[in-house]
Amino acid sequence: MPRFTALRAGLATAFIAAIGLAATASPALAAPNLQLPFLCGQQWRLDTWAHAPALDMVKEPDQQGTDGATLVAPAAGTVNQSFYHSNAGNVIQINHGGGYYTTYLHLKSRSVSVGAKVQMGTTIGKVGATGPTSNGHPHLHFELGHDADGSGSASWGYAGSERVRPTFNGVTYGGSNGQTWRNVTSRNCGAPTGQASVYGVLPDGRLTYTAIDAATGRRTHGAVTSTATLGFTPKAMATLNFNTILITEDGPDGRLYRVDVITNNTSLSFNPPILLGTGFTHDLLTFDGANLFGIAAGVLRRYPVNATKPARSNILTGALIGGGFTLKTLTATGPNWILGTTDSGLLISYRINGVENYSRFQLKDSTWQAFDHLMSPGGGVYYGHRPEGSVHRYLDADPHDGNGTDIAGQGTVDTSGWVQTLLSAQPATVR
């Protein structure tokens, strides 16, 4: 049993005696989607001891490295408390909106002041052992609270305060006293940064361009629309880079065209499409930054592309990856990683290992049938388009772990207006 066990009663008793504020009340709004307040990939032990739903945290496997460990914000918010408390030591409290606050005690140092805006992953301090109630033992005392009385903060540190059970990475902790969770991995990998560049085709054959700020989900540009039309009926598309798109024609020959975009600043124009070849009868296309993936009749093929403005000779012979890819949508999340949805609502990720060699990961079992297009600009950011014209955004804390529990909805980019029949995002523009 870790040496930390002996401290649990003293900590709980000291906090109860130290502070007397508001009574507990039931939260009225959904709690924020939190990640552990530690660097991505670190593992920590969580204990309720005698003060559930508050949690004490020490670094795994043997608590070494707890003292001085970097503390980061578990979600976006505004710092509303940052001070030294006579019992709790260095304290920070962050307002995450909706009446929810996270509070951090015994910190070795604080690196944010009241009023500071933070994003998920922003460094806010260092874990320590300040204040008499730490008993000199480095650990983080963490609380999620809900401001039930409207005072503008959440009371903390004692039984009967406004603290509530926190949920990290989709798992809720702190249900009762005496609970321990070992080796809890932080998926706090920071907010995505960068711009998503999304191309589309309208029903009349005109092209569109839209830019989305990956961190906020807000459109920053567009949709800008071309005056010219493609001149053929498109079937599938993939964005190679900022100025190059591949589009197939809906016809028996499977004609593949390269479209060179000239500008998409205040206007969008493009050169006449260049026919690259035939035989590309794919229902879905996507590009991972080096390879073009296509699905035709459930069969997945991979075509290495070795030029930014490829001729047919630059798109190498398609290697058979496998059959049974009955997907409704397709996008690439990284080199040799693709993601798609099915008519029944599954969200499935595939790691492409080689010719006729892949690994399948079922991330979600339902609800994703609502989307008719799926796009990923990288960084674990996913955009889903619904037929009524809305676009919704999601963040996968680790898009290549084969696990869907860390996928969180991030709201709506737009509730309407996206009337494109095809959509595709430039890969690897978001980190």
Image (cartoon, rainbow, N blue to C red):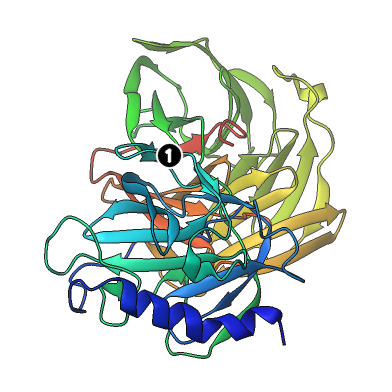
Q: Nearer the viewer, residue 279 or 364?
A: 364
Which quarter of the figure has residue 278?
Answer: top right
90 up-or-down from 223: above or below: below
Q: Nearer the viewer, residue 87 or 298?
A: 87
246 up-or-down from 403: above or below: above
Residue at disc 1, secondary structure: loop
241 with respect to 142 (left or right): right
268 with respect to 310 (left or right): left
158 up-or-down from 234: above or below: below
Neighbourhood count class around disc 1 (C-alpha, 10 Å): few under 14, some 14–19, many 20 upward: some
How far across and down, in percent of the image, does residue 20 sit?
Answer: 23, 73
Is residue 29 visible to us here?
yes
Mark 1, residue position = 112
Residue at 64% x, 58% y: name it: 297
Of the 4 image quadrants, the one containing the C terminus is top right
246 up-or-down from 98: above or below: above
159 with respect to 254 (left or right): left
Which quarter of the figure has residue 228?
Answer: top left
Which quarter of the figure has residue 1?
Answer: bottom right
Q: Nearer the viewer, residue 66 or 167?
A: 66
How far across and down, in percent of the image, does residue 151 sit?
Answer: 13, 59
168 with respect to 203 (left or right): right
Is residue 343 visible to us here?
no
Q: Nearer the viewer, residue 370 or 233?
A: 370
Residue at 64% x, 52% y: name it: 69
Count of numbered labels shown in the rendering: 1
- Which residue reaches farthest left? 150
Residue type at mark 1 is Val
How far across and down, in percent of the image, does residue 201 sit?
Answer: 41, 31
How far across and down, in percent of the image, does residue 28 sit?
Answer: 17, 71
